[in-house]
Image (cartoon, rainbow, N blue to C red):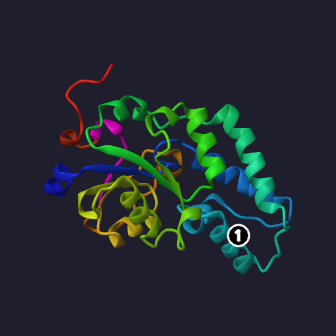
């Protein structure tokens, strides 16, 4: 692992739960919107069936689990409610805004979120300036996480080989996608949705919950001005 990390030329960040502490908000909105339809789910259900997956995959799981049709505008209603709460509640994960300017390798975002949602998420959190247009979503590939497609697509666009790429993920599907892509991966457990939960990860994957523990070999000695 140490040799792979030292050689990394690109760091791919997942967004929700890694760059921003959005997952507790997302879970609360989904629970509320489903309750309006008479469907009751818990935060544990969201963690087990929704974390790290695209909304179409989540909607499919809900329909199959509860044998309930979802209104055609359900996704739009969910996203509208979510973005409204993001405006006042969304925060970056502690320490990430200090770490990003110090990062030696190139960086980008690869997320299961929609393009509209990730764009607004990065704007609200103040992190958009660190990534510019280097933001990739599951809508750009045939298969979402845990398939490797999104990470492979992002690395190809950034011009970096998979074996010189490090992925930072908070979800099991995301971790599996990175491993399937032949990339090094670290599991970030610093989001509110993972507090108190034991990571369910492959044995070779290291988990950390504080950006102060990010590998020093990937950081500049001093922050850029």
Residue at position x 18%, y 58% in the image? 1
Residue at position x 41%, y 35% in the image? 96
Q: Is residue 127 visible?
A: no
In the image, residue 113 lies at what x, y percent? 59, 55
Q: Residue furthest left?
A: 3
Residue at position x 53%, y 30% in the image? 126
Q: Is residue 57 visible?
A: yes
Q: Residue furthest top?
A: 225
- Compared to residue 5, the image places residue 94 above or below, namely above
Magenta stretch: give its range. Answer: 205-213
Q: Is residue 70 left or right of residue 9?
A: right
Q: Is residue 220 left or right of residue 64?
A: left
Q: Looking at this view, is 82 or 204 the one in front?
A: 82
Q: Is residue 76 magenta?
A: no
Q: Is residue 105 left or right of residue 61?
A: left
The quarter holding residue 142 reads bottom right
Task: Report which residue position mark 1 lands on.
Answer: 59
Residue at position x 63%, y 58% in the image? 43
In the image, residue 147 lies at what x, y percent? 45, 73
In which quadrant of the rendered image does the C terminus lie? Answer: top left
In the image, residue 167 lies at what x, y percent? 35, 55
In the image, residue 82 lies at what x, y percent? 71, 47
The quarter holding residue 75 reads bottom right
């Amino acid at each position: 692992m140490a040799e792979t990390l030292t050689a990394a030329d690109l760091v791919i960040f997942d967004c929700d739960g890694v760059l921003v502490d959005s997952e507790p908000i997302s879970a609360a909105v989904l629970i509320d919107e489903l309750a309006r339809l008479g469907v009751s789910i818990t935060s544990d259900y969201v963690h087990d069936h929704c974390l790290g997956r695209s909304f179409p995959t989540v909607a499919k799981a809900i329909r199959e689990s509860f044998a309930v049709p979802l209104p055609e505008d359900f996704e739009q209603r969910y996203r509208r409610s979510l973005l409204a709460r993001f405006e006042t509640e969304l925060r970056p994960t502690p320490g990430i805004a200090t770490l990003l300017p110090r990062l030696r390798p190139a960086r980008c975002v690869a997320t299961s979120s929609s393009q509209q949602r990730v764009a607004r998420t990065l704007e609200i959190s103040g992190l958009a300036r660190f990534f510019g247009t280097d933001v990739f979503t599951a809508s750009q590939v045939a298969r979402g996480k845990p398939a490797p497609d999104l990470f492979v697509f992002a690395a190809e666009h950034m011009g970096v080989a998979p074996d010189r790429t490090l992925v930072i993920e908070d979800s099991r599907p995301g971790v599996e996608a990175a491993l399937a892509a032949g990339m090094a991966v670290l599991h970030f457990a610093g989001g509110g949705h993972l507090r108190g939960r034991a990571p369910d990860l492959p044995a070779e994957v290291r988990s950390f919950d504080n950006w102060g523990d990010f590998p020093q070999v990937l950081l500049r000695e001093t922050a850029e001005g």
